[in-house]
Amino acid sequence: MNTPYYLIDEAALRRNLEILRGVRERTGCKILLAQKAFSMFAVYPIIAEYLDGATASGLFEARLAAEELRGENHVFSAAYRAEDIPELARLCDHVVFNSCAQLRAYAPQVLAAGKQAGLRINPECSTQEGHAIYDPCGEKSRLGVTRAQFDPEVLPLLSGLHFHTLCEQNSDDLVRTVAAFEQNFGQYMDGLKWINLGGGHHITRADYDVETLVHCIDYLQKKYKVQVYLEPGEAVVLNAGYLVATVLEVMHNHKDIAILDTSA
């Protein structure tokens, strides 16, 4: 077979998916594949055996999920084009907005299609170290509505709230984030149907504290009477494959240097 190519270890993939299914079965939460992290649709039929659906970051990923992965189809984007909303409202079960302005502008079309609208919020609780440029809770972040920006008048348009603040992190960071979320937005949960805890949960890592995750999910679902969603990406396929390459040349400059037919 010609290189380079990605080789997926089905047994390793299924081991990850079994862990995720275990969290689903213990808590009743729903888990979606974050396609922005992994969109190799050849293995979507396997993933569909274990997860509840997928989440997209735009129209094309939403189409991919609709065509290749059965189950729920969610989408979040930092901003939407007006011309994409009708198709997104047709394809997706949840359309999550990044501002109250976009919510007001486009949620009526989503609701008219019988679908649900959500709002991404910023709990202003940074748990990142060394990734300031990617921190959704960092200073001047464009991602999510802060408490100061939140307008309670949009609540009638909403079915749920969404936050995504983690990146390859353990569940202790989720505990801190949930506390900040409650402090800033807990008062608005009455009457909502769901809360989406986003991605960045490294659930399938060997040292991940699954018990704390389960406790967080149970706590939120019981206290607020909502459905909890998770959107792991990397955790679905963590250590479940290989990039296969060919060594084209070996040079020597103080040490042997392999030249491959691929790159970062």
Image (tube, helix red, strand yellow):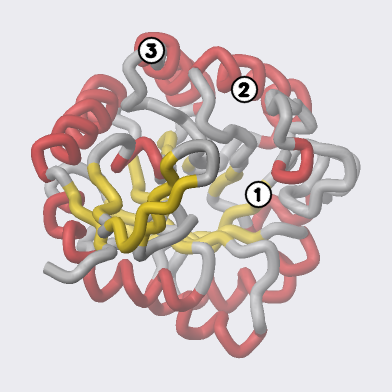
Residue 121 percent across, percent down from the top left: 70, 44
> Residue at horizontal 43%, vertical 28%?
202
Residue at coordinates 62% horizontally, 22% vertically from top-left? 178
Indicate the amino acid at tag 1: Arg
> According to the image, label 3 marks what residue?
207
Q: Position of residue 132 (x, y in %)?
A: 77, 37
- Mark 2 vs mark 3, CA separation in Å: 21 Å
- Label 1 and label 2: CA atoms lie apart by 14 Å
Number of dots carrying numbers = 3
Which numbered marker is on residue 178?
A: 2
Q: Nearer the viewer, residue 138 or 65?
A: 138
Is residue 78 visible in the rendered image? The answer is yes
Q: Secondary structure at mark 3?
A: loop
Say if 158 sits above or below 77 in the image. Answer: above
The three-letter amino acid code for the residue at tag 3 is Asp
- Please indicate, yes or no, whether residue 30 appears anywhere in the rendered image: no
Horizontal relation, residue 7 to residue 104: left or right = left
Height in image: 92 above or below 264? below
The reply to whether discs 2 and 3 touch (Cβ–Cβ < 8 Å) is no
Q: Position of residue 20 (x, y in %)?
A: 26, 31
Badge 2 element: helix
Residue type (three-letter) at the residue carrying disc 2: Val
Q: CA distance from mark 3 to mark 1?
A: 29 Å
In the image shown, does 80 or 136 lie closer to the viewer?
Answer: 136
Residue under pointer 1: 120
Of residues 91 and 32, the one nearer the viewer is 32
Quadrant in the picture for residue 56: bottom left
Q: Residue at x 73, y 69 (%)?
A: 102
Q: Tell me where residue 71 sits by quadrant.
A: bottom left
Instruction: Point out the tag, 2 or 3, that comes first from the N-terminus.
Output: 2
